[in-house]
Image (cartoon, rainbow, N blue to C red):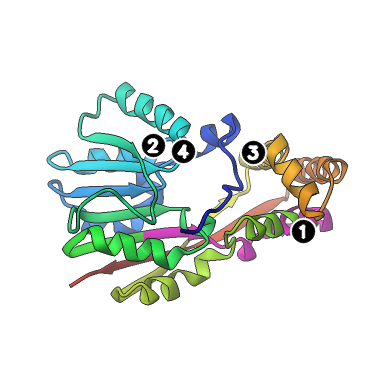
Amino acid sequence: MPREIYTHSHHQVVLDAHGSRTAEEAAAFVRHLVRPEMRILDAGCGPGSITCGLGRWVPDGEVVGVDSAAAVLEYARSHASNEDLRNVTFEQADVYGLSFGTGSFDVVFAHQLLQHLGSPVMALQEFRRVLRPGGVVAVRDADYGTMTFFPHDPGIDRFFEIYARVARANGGEPDAGRRLLSWVQSAGFLNPMYTTSSWSYSTPEERKRWANLWTERTGVSKYVDRVEELGVGSKSELQGLGAALRIWAEKPDATFSVLHGEVVAQID
């Protein structure tokens, strides 16, 4: 089985950022297909905020969140407990070999997961296995190649060039968004529907939060060590590029946006 390195790590700054995500935003593209009695698998659930949102969508059903990292699942369980969601559970799992029986779920949802996998088609085939007849797969991933900044800053280009090289060396594909349709088709799903949505940041608060997230995320020791191990940059360079990103965020006319690919497909 492929074994990847999770580029973002599970540093607290990452958990806090991912824990602010909602089903209302992240899963909007599949909301119209979700019914109250459904059983949903949230693959790569992370800290569980989206999982909990899905749980509120299926009050007569069940949501199971799975992730490969045991530590992040404790965070997720705490989140669900605080919201008193009794139809939401979490399990440690490998998306290439899920422990669930064939035909166990009505929906398999994955948000920002496939970009980190060395074999996304293999994972999608496993999602297909655990879906019931007529079941739905719904996947959403960013496309880093669509990131746009204004005003332009070559330091920011370099910052994300380093990230992309590390992500690919770790087994992932940061431009996953544009590839989702192809991957889903290759996994055997019929009549997939492809859409896009975007994140954008333009207010001072949004820009500052986004810049701080990335500079802190890529400043953690494991990422820095990996950059230097691969020979694609250095700690001092990352510090300088992070400073450039924060300076950019202070500019009153600065804007950032990135597209996400989204695919919904059903099985027979």
* Residue underneath mark 1: 157
**Circles 1 and 3 in contact, beta carbons < 8 Å:** no
Tell which tag, 3 or 4, sits nearer the viewer: 4
Residue 204 spot, x, y in % from top left: 66, 39
Q: Which mark is residue 48?
A: 2
Tell which tag, 2 or 4, sits nearer the viewer: 4
- The residue that appears at 58% across and 63% down in the rendered structure is 173
The total of numbered circles placed on residues is 4
Residue 251 spot, x, y in % from top left: 77, 45
The amino acid type found where label 2 is placed reads Gly
Tell which tag, 4 or 1, sits nearer the viewer: 4
Residue 252 visible (yes or no) = no
In-image side of 133 versus 255 (left or right): left
* Residue underneath mark 4: 69
Front in this rendered view, residue 236 or 99: 99
Range of residues picked out in magenta: 139-161
Earlier residue among tags 2 and 4 = 2
* Residue underneath mark 3: 213
Whole-number angstrom distance, CA of label 3 to CA of label 4: 21 Å
